[in-house]
Amino acid sequence: MVEVEECIGLVCDRKVPLKLKGKFYKMVVRPPMLYGAECWPLKEKHNTKLSVAEMRMLRWMSGFTLRDRIRNEHIREKVGVASVEDKIRDSRLRWFGHIKRRSSNDPIRRVEVLDLTYVKKGRGTPKKTWLKNIRNDLSLLDLNKNLTFNRTQ
């Protein structure tokens, strides 16, 4: 297991190139942060909190502060890291493709026909489900459900 002091020393060292810090971030920091994200029914406020946390880490690693007024996209480009929303969307669609390629009587396929009409709904907006997130992701990227059977695309 990597020691925290060693990690902080690597991340804070100005002599270490930003691309190397970005690789370290992608390999050590991001995986625990997004563990199981392919199954989360994320709302916009959750996406915002994850983005803010990620940008705080990236700014800290790169030595920039908010007072420097450097745009997030520029910092991401310098470090070589994609946005956390994109990574969550990719993992969610990858998991959806895995589910769709399973046989129709496989227990994991029950998520497609899960009926939540009997669940008592509270006040406020309707609950965000995983399948609604998948539909939004597919429409955002202009993809079709049938593309999941062809893994080469």
Image (tube, helix red, strand yellow):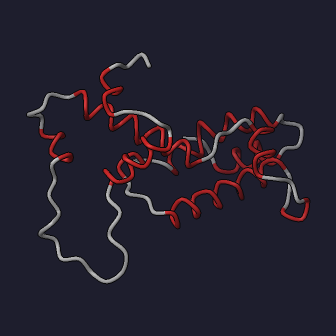
Q: Nearer the viewer, residue 4 or 67?
A: 67
Q: Nearer the viewer, residue 23 or 131?
A: 131
Residue 117 at x, y percent in the picture: 15, 66
Q: How many marks?
A: 0
Q: Residue at x 37, y 33 (%)?
A: 144
Q: Tell which residue pokes out farthest to the bottom in this image.
A: 123
Q: Nearer the viewer, residue 127 or 40?
A: 127
Q: Residue at x 12, y 32 (%)?
A: 104
In this rendering, would 113 be left or right of 22?
left
Q: Quadrant of residue 102?
A: top left
Residue 91 at x, y percent in the picture: 44, 39
Q: Tell which residue pokes out farthest to the left in this image.
A: 105
Q: Tell which residue pokes out farthest to the top in this image.
A: 152
Quadrant of image for the C terminus: top left
Residue 109 at x, y percent in the picture: 17, 40
In this rendering, would 116 be left or right of 60?
left
Q: Nearer the viewer, residue 123 or 66?
A: 123
In the picture shown, does residue 100 fall above or below 134?
above
Quadrant of image for the N terminus: top right
Q: Residue at x 32, y 68 (%)?
A: 127
Residue 32 at x, y percent in the picture: 50, 48
In the picture shown, does residue 108 fall above or below 123?
above
Q: Residue at x 24, y 27 (%)?
A: 101
